[in-house]
Amino acid sequence: MRSPRHAVVVAASLALAGCEGWQSSLDPKGPHASAIHDLFWFFTAVCALVWALVVLALAWALWRRRGLRPDPLSIQGGRERRLTIVVSTLVALTGVTLIGLTIASYASQRRLFGPQEARLTIRITGHQWWWDAVYEDPDPQRTFSTANEIHVPVNQPVLLKLEASDVIHSLWVPSLAGKQDLIPGRQNLLTIQADRAGVYRGQCAEFCGWQHAHMGFLVVAQPQQDFDAWRNQQIVARAPPDDELRKQGEGVFLSSTCVTCHTVRGAGAGGRVGPDLTHVGGRQYIAAGALRMSAEALAAWIVDPQGVKPGVHMPATPLRPDQVQPLAAYLEGLK
Amino acid sequence: MSEASVRPAKDVRDTQLDAAELHARLARTWGSGRGLLAALSTVDHKIIGRRYIVTAFLFLFLAGLSAVAMRLQLARPESALMGPDLYNQLFTMHGTTMMFLFAVPVMEAFAVYLVPLMVGTRNIAFPRLNAFSYYVYVFGGLMLWVAFALNIGPDTGWFAYVPLSGPENSPGKRVDFWAQMITFTEVAALAVSVEIITTVFKQRAPGMTLDRLPLSVWTQLVTAFVVIFAMPAVMLASTMLILDRLVETHFFNPAEGGDALLWQHMFWFFGHPEVYIIFLPATGFVSSIVVTFSRRPMFGYLPMVLSVISVGFLSFGLWVHHMFTAGVPQLGASFFTGASMLIAIPNGVQIFCWIATLWDGKPVFRTPLLFALGFIVIFVIGGLTGVMVASVPIDTQVHDTYFVVAHFHYVLIGGAVFPLLGAVYYWFPKLTGRMMSERLGTWHFWLAFVSFNVAFFPMHILGLQGMPRRVYAYQAEMGWGPLNLLVTIGAAFFFLSFVLFLWNAVTSLRAGAPAGDNPWDAGTLEWATSSPPSPQNFDRIPFVTHREPLWAQRDALTVVAGLAVDHREVLVTSVTEARPDLRETSPAPSIWPFVSAIAVGATFIASIFTPWGVVWGAAPVGVALICWFWPKGAPEDEE
Amino acid sequence: MTRGALMLLCASLLVGACERERREFRRDPVVASDEDKITMSSISPGGGQPAAQSSARAKEFENNAYHVSQGKKYYTWFNCNGCHSNGGGGSGPPLMDDTWIYGGSMENIVRTIKEGRPNGMPSFRDRIPDDQIWELAAYVRSMGRAIPQDVAPGRNDDMHPRPAENRQPYVTPIPGGSTPPSGLAPQ
């Protein structure tokens, strides 16, 4: 069951979708992204000033008034000395500027990557081309898996353990933090934190094959109590379908290809190849951010995944037209 | 060996002949002859250099076309123009061709053509190796593009990160062709570097001490050293990759003790110096152009030389800044932040010295100078965004986004292509004997300058707005559509500017104004000979007394005498002082470098399909090399 | 002469390359619906020669590196190694040897996967889409190196119990062999 506030968040996020800033490092919504944002503008201001001065100096050098120079080799010692002093001073100033920028960078780096406490740990595994998210908990009963959309409580640092199952991916939610690669054979760590409730989009940033372009990711930041409600709801198995159409849909799901790769906890489907679909209907997007969630989108995706995301590893499932609608309705109902 | 030894009667020296006779006989001795066989056998650095330049520009056009195709795809959201398979091949071909088949070879091409002329010698050192390197390069490039035409184009990016390019995730032969292309072009690059270093150290005209060496030659010298230390890393990496793919080694397999990050370290240990391999020669072009057109010797010659050398050294300490998001330890990353910031200082020194030279000189605004000025304006932006991405926190946001795409196009197009175009306008009269059109050149410059900025500046913003690199499509709701359309328009006009350039070059080649020996009234030695230079380069080897010899001795250069006329003889001088040491025979034309290149190429290609290719290929390679090096007895060996 | 050789080499690449390198994500539906018409081996092992006829569709899959490598992925994902291990066989017969109880042609293998076989091999009809069965069959053939070496997959990024498919010596499939081990095992 979703709380009303949850519904508000979702509605707000839908309104926000498409607006400037839901995947933008220029619109930071967390302390990490804000710190980088400030550093970025400091660097930009200094660099823009340096560039302007260089171009002005160049313009002056080109168009200043000067006398004739019949012999290119006639060089005045005094002028040469003055130029030497000017150039040396400029080089020294460059050095000082660079030292200043370096110190600013180090300070920011120390703040960002220093030791941080996190109460919530999510293990994220990159696959071609989707994200598997496992909410870790000391109690194995409370560990659960979801995909392509994670929920986090606001104002709390969340530790992401990043792993990859096939090739290198990179997790990047620009509004919350910088990116971090997911590398096979390693585990990288990234801390994210959202200051405000909202939906922030991320995307794979390391080239990972055909569908690198469609490997999206949502971070839904919620107030603590909404987050807890969401989490408790995710932990439980799927609710049995309550109408005829959906019951029929579950039958189709369990008797077709789907079950080979996908898990629906409680329905007896335990495939571990594709995303966990136990609560897929509660997500805002399917196919790693490629399509907005709806029964129609699900049907389109199941019947022709290669048309939506060419090269994706999910095969087209041969279904009769009278099977598609119940299946899509069933999946959409898995809130 | 000594001058006093008794000479055979046949040995005619240049002291015995008058100017016209000397010119004709030298041209006969050093000429390449006619016919297909002679064309393939030639060892004349000017002919090979010219072929190198033309070939590299052909690859530039191919890579530019693939860029235009990509921009058409990205002009609007979720465009259905092409699928990810073709797009991935296109951006891989674009990057690979630009870096390995255009940028590095074209800089080396200019070195091959100009360095012997600038240091005042008759041919490059190891001229047959030079011919061999050209053919190997051509075969490597042809192989890659033929493969692309056959749908075997590599599709994992010019960086080919494992495990994506590894055996599990890239089936077929596409990546194998890419890896072998690396081997081809690196063999060629290493060969040229050895020639350049030897030519500069041992074949300078007498009197051209190291502190009279033109800055252009200094940059080529430092670049050659950087090539020698950087390129083996990528050859090793690509060989390990192909071994992983073909014979099941486990260099990059974490489950068997390999490491996926090892590839990145080795690739970028080459990949960062690569940027300077491309950029340093371009700064040499800028120095030549700035000096000539501001009518003043370079201000701060010594700091310039020291900057170039220190950039060469520092370029090896930056590679990890390509891997800041890969999970390297923060302390290590900080070191590379520091080093990346540091390299801005020598580059700053160069910029300040150019501006000071222009300030004190009297600038003559011709097309080459326009491109050099465009270079300063654009490159400084690229350099400053480079300072930004050197900072770890900023890099975690902009890494692998269009911000970085914008950054390195500002560095590489601004820092290398603009100087290169300036260099073409500058040396075209020397290469062809004709001037390029000044009017078209001005149009070309302004079209290129404006459209470049329209095409690439908005990419900074796109990157900050969250657009990652190497995406074949993006969703309309991301809001990147309008800026991408603008970028595509800019890119189309930028491509047009190159068409204009090509038009200018072709028409000027046919009907440009005759140039004369020294149309720009420049000061370095390549302008002391005819345009285009005769096969022997100089009838008499000049004796250098000044950094700008043609400005110091306006009427006639002092020359040295005593070289043989009837066989190819070059003067070998000491490394620092350029004191004449000995006369050395320079190799005559031979078809065997060409045959060897074919044998080597066939071996490389065969090894893509079977490891036995290396074994079978060894035989023809061995035979070709034996014929190539069969001792024929140089005159000095027989004395 | 040498140039001719180079041209010849390029031409031979042209012939070999197109098929090997095509990435056909979404096959033409008309082709895809083409149900295999060839009669396969009898259901019981050992009896009679299975038809070793090879259709155009078989060639399309087994000469294409993309399909074979996808087959390799699905082989693990669909848990084929649960019974057949990495090809060495477990409760199911080995797949990397040259013996094919129910025939070693693409059609035979496809039929085996689709319809199942006695003594344990389940039917995957409707559980695995058609094209993926063909990809699996192509991969299974590559385990015994019955497909060209330049199409066979290289090693995976994991532990290696046996040489990769492209390192296996070529073997000619022999029809025949005994009942699968699970048939002999006590119930």
Image (cartoon, helix red, strand yellow):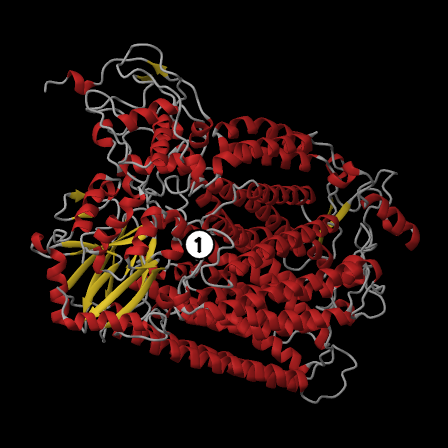
Q: Position of residue B435 (x, y in %)?
A: 80, 65
Q: Which residue is mark 1?
A: B269
Q: Secondary structure at mark 1?
A: helix
Between B118 and A65, the residue placed more toward the observer is A65
Between B617 and C109, the residue placed more toward the observer is C109
B339 left or right, relative to A319: right
Q: Which chain is disc 1 placed on?
A: B
Q: Residue at x 28, y 13 (%)?
A: C177
A259 left or right, relative to B152: left
Query: Splitting the image into 4 quarters, where does residue B587 fall?
Result: top right
Query: Splitting the image into 4 quarters, where does residue C82 fall?
Result: top left
Using a 10 Å C-alpha cutoff, classify the residue at mark 1 as few (fewer than 14 neighbours), some (14 to 19) or many (20 or more). many
Amino acid type, label 1: Phe
Q: Quadrant of the N terminus of chain B?
A: top right
- Vertical placement of C152 versus A325: above or below? above
Q: Position of residue A88 (x, y in %)?
A: 53, 80
Q: How many marks?
A: 1
- Vertical placement of A299 versus B635: above or below? below
Residue B316 visible here: yes
- Vertical placement of C160 versus B129: above or below? above
B517 left or right, relative to C40: right
Q: Quadrant of the C terminus of chain B?
A: top right
C148 left or right, relative to B433: left
Q: Residue at x 57, y 77 (%)?
A: B352
Query: Splitting the image into 4 quarters, where does residue B567 fall?
Result: top right
Residue A309 visible here: no
Q: Position of residue B626 (x, y in %)?
A: 64, 30
Q: Position of residue A266 (x, y in %)?
A: 12, 48
